[in-house]
Amino acid sequence: MCGMELVPVKASAGGEGDEYGIDLEPVARRLANIKTVPAERRRVYRSIRTVGEIDFDESRLATIAAYVAGRIEKLFADYTGIDVTEGDHMVVLYSPELYAAQVEYLVTRKTAQRMGGLAKRDTADSARRFALNRSRADTALPHSGDASVRPTSATRLWTFQSDMVEDAREKLRELGMTDRQIVELEARGQAQTRLRICAPIGGTVIAKLRQEGDYVKAGDPIYRIADLSVVWLMLELFPDDASQVRYGQKVEVRVDSLPNEVFTGRVAFIDPVVDPKTRTVSVRVEMVNPDRRLRPGDYATATIKVPITPDGRCYDPELAGKWIGPCHPQILQDRPGRCPVCDSELLPTSRFGYDDEPRPSHRVLVVPRDALLMVGDHSVVYVETKPGRFEIRPVTVGALTDDEAVILSGVEEGEQVATSGNFLIDSQMQLAGKPCLIDPSRAIEQDEGPERSSEPSGPPSLDGSGLMAEGQTPEALPIGAAEAAHAVSAGSSLSENGATILSDELGQTLDKIFRCYFAIQQALAADREPAEADGTGLRRAAQQLLGHESAPETLREDASAIIEHAEHLHGPGLAEARQRFKPISHAVIRMARRFRGPGSQTDFVHFHCPMVEGGGGDWLQVGGPLANPYFGSQMLRCGRKVAELKVSEQAPRVADEQPERGLKGATRR
């Protein structure tokens, strides 16, 4: 890969565990830059990051509107953005309707006061008469119809008039007057045509909707005020992330306009419904903003740290065993009570999934993410069991954080795992035929030398791509079932070793395929794009083979694979050409193993490079030193010889008088 001299792997001492690891000399370890760290238990948090927008707290918005029709004579808040306090004068409104209501109230109240004095005198006279009747010992108590205890007409009128006064006072409130203004009206005793409207809350004027001199109707808005001491951060989370978030959970917030500041808030609301358009869940974060540095409309980055625990409960030392406001998560108390903001009853934090009492937070076994090798359903780490010895360990992985992986099984606390150079260790394991990332459960075959034995131990088999399984030789591979059926029907016998020579047109077509293939292989090994003529010739030859009626089904399938990938070998670039070469090469190897033409009767050499992406790559050469077409000059000699594909000494021949049966034009070499 890098052109440096390879350092021999230290020979294993033998034993049961040798097949699952390799030994490296100190020099080799330094060259490979292999580093290890211990697996340890610690508190782990999964970080959920998202982007949101700061918005107003809807519960802290107020609108100043006209309660009665009239004309605006004065606006005290001259511009949008001015700060006001509760009770500040905001608007002077001229309203004849309000003037009439004030006059009505004053008259009604004055009448009630006069009737109240008369009613008091009548009540005193009635009390004296009642006392006189009670003093008569020989007289029974007066019955209910006695005039001495009946309410006088003056008292009844006073009660009625008092009700009218209360109705008139309520009418003034509905027209926008405050209780303080009503008291001032009573003390003044004179109605006014103008009403001063005050700010209902303190905050910032965010909208000025009318100008002086405008006529307004009842209900028309004039100002909008927002209290910015508390703001909301609106977030959108994916459903799987939202399921890990709880009410009251702390959120770290960073604002682009304040890059060096970190703000905190708490989750105040999690939408129970998924948005059907965006497929996200809305989450609202409440943030205290006493210095008004957080501005609605700003974008912010939020980070929610979710603790990873086996029981699924959330541990937060600030919330354990506390009581929290049901609408305002910033309200936390040590005992039950009522929320000072909304007067709701405080709820225990355990209701939202937090611990009932403080306890040591749960620790899980973790390793760095760099130590974990993953492909498909396989996850492995390499553990240094003793100095210089690294063994493969399949592991069960739990949650993944930004920098760490939770290990559920496979590694013990304190074991040293490789975090740097582990891919080189895995490559060495793969080259040695030992378990590796691609197949951790692979059976181990101990070899005496760099090449495997040529004697098969059992029936030959093919891998998933139709190529030879590693360590097998092609001599014992039978011709495909379709070819055998044709040959038997022709009355000929098949040789058990080597490929069959086909003559005439079908064999000549195979020769064209092999010639174009070897030209493409040599060009790629020399870091050149294949010539357009070679790519076109390969495709046309495969199309001709596909058109032969006598071509076996296996050859047709391989020809179809060549046609599919050979169309754009020239032009898209060297990397793309090498990717397309891989399936073409596999199809040609399958052809060469079974059949040859009259011009391709030499032995072909089958090579394999395990470094090719996707489980390795294969190719054929006629002879000469190994020349890797997948990497060219970068790793020209990377690969190993799998087998020599020989030609049958006794090729089956079809009788000339029966050309329609079997393999047309087959002849003895």
Image (tube, grey):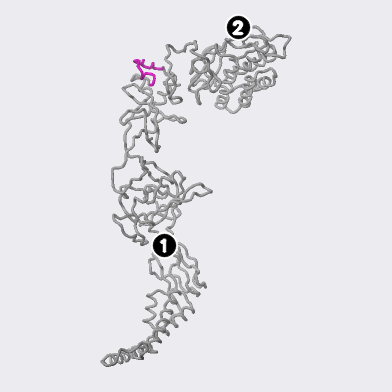
Q: Which one is in front in this view, the residue at disc 1 or the one at disc 2?
A: 2
Locate residue 25, reporting x and y percent.
34, 19
Specify the quadrant of the image occupied by residue 581: top right
Distance, label 1 to label 2, CA atoms, is 98 Å
**Residue 8 inside the magenta-drawn segment:** yes
Please state which of residues 327 and 615 is positioned toward the viewer in this rendering: 327
**Secondary structure, magenta segment, majority class:** loop
Would you name the residue on which mark 1 appears? Answer: 204
Above or below, comparing residue 588 to residue 288 in the picture: above
Residue 558: assigned label:
none
Above or below, comparing residue 118 to residue 98 in the picture: below
Would you name the residue on which mark 2 appears? Answer: 649
Residue with the most extreme right position: 657
Which amino acid, by three-letter code, is at mark 1? Answer: Thr
Locate residue 662, reporting x and y percent.
68, 14
Which amino acid, by three-letter code, is at mark 2? Answer: Glu
Query: Which quarter of the rendered picture does the C terminus lie within?
Result: top right
Query: Which quarter of the rendered picture does the N terminus lie within?
Result: top left
Above or below, comparing residue 590 to residue 252 in the picture: above
Q: Residues within 10 Å of mark 2 (few under 14, many from 20)?
A: some
Q: First in sequence: mark 1 or mark 2?
A: 1
Locate residue 104, reporting x and y percent.
45, 83
Locate residue 105, reporting x and y percent.
43, 82
- What segment carries the magenta color? 6-20
